[in-house]
Image: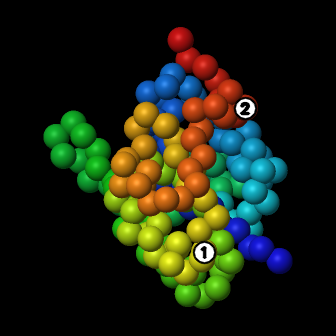
Amino acid sequence: MEKINIYIDGNNLYRAAKKRCFKIDYKKFNGWLRQKYNPKNVYLFIGLLPQRALFYEYLKKCGFALIFKQTISVGKTIKGNCDAELVLGCVSDFYTKSFTSCILITGDGDFGCLVEFLVINQALHRVIAPDRDRCSILLKNKNIEITFLNEHYHKFSQQLT
């Protein structure tokens, strides 16, 4: 029996959807993922901002397991890159046999090494990139199947004008 975990680069997903003028309905998105892939766990990696506590509660109610990164302010920019947490969580889950295969939701080329690790260990189900036009060549050149959300946003998002 296949056990699938999904690991979501929350910032990459949010920014790609916003750039394409979509606002994700996270309850519908989680439903779409569960219907399509039947995952055991869906992890959402995001930066922690105390003022977003109600949003985090909403995400939990939608069925996401939240993994936070402490954020810092650099001028007017808030930084909370979760790449290392996502890689560590995924690799740790691999070694504890928490899944038989996994799905990465990101278009970030920094995850190329994780993709290679998962492919070598026959543990990658697929990569889902939030935007075909902004998916890194460092993922596209891995000779893996990539699903692009461009054709799917309408199923779980609201078009912004």
- Which residue is identified by label 2? 155
Q: Nearer the viewer, residue 56 or 22?
A: 22
Question: Residue 120, image x and y in percent?
Answer: 51, 78
Count of number-bearing discs: 2
Residue flagged by tag 2: what amino acid is it? Lys
**Distance between the alpha carbons at the discs numbered 2 and 1:** 27 Å
Residue 79, compared with residue 99, is above or below; it is above
> Which quadrant holds residue 124?
bottom right
- Residue 48 visible, this orientation: no
Q: Nearer the viewer, residue 23 or 147?
A: 147
Horizontally, residue 147 falls left or right of residue 40, namely left
Q: Nearer the viewer, residue 141 or 22?
A: 141
Residue 156, compared with residue 112, is above or below; it is above
Q: Dot 1: within a 10 Å radius of its alpha carbon, few (fewer than 14), some, or many (20 or more) residues?
A: some
Question: Residue 27, image x and y in percent?
Answer: 72, 42
Tag nearer the camera, 2 or 1: 1
Question: Residue 123, image x and y in percent?
Answer: 60, 74
Dot 2: element? helix
Numbered badge on residue 153 = none
Residue at point 72% right, 32% down?
155
Residue flagged by tag 1: what amino acid is it? Ala
- Which residue is identified by label 1? 123
**In the rendered view, how is the structure colored?**
rainbow
- Residue 154 visible, this orientation: yes
Question: Residue 114, image x and y in percent?
Answer: 44, 69
> Which quadrant holds residue 133?
top left
Residue at point 23% right, 47% down?
73
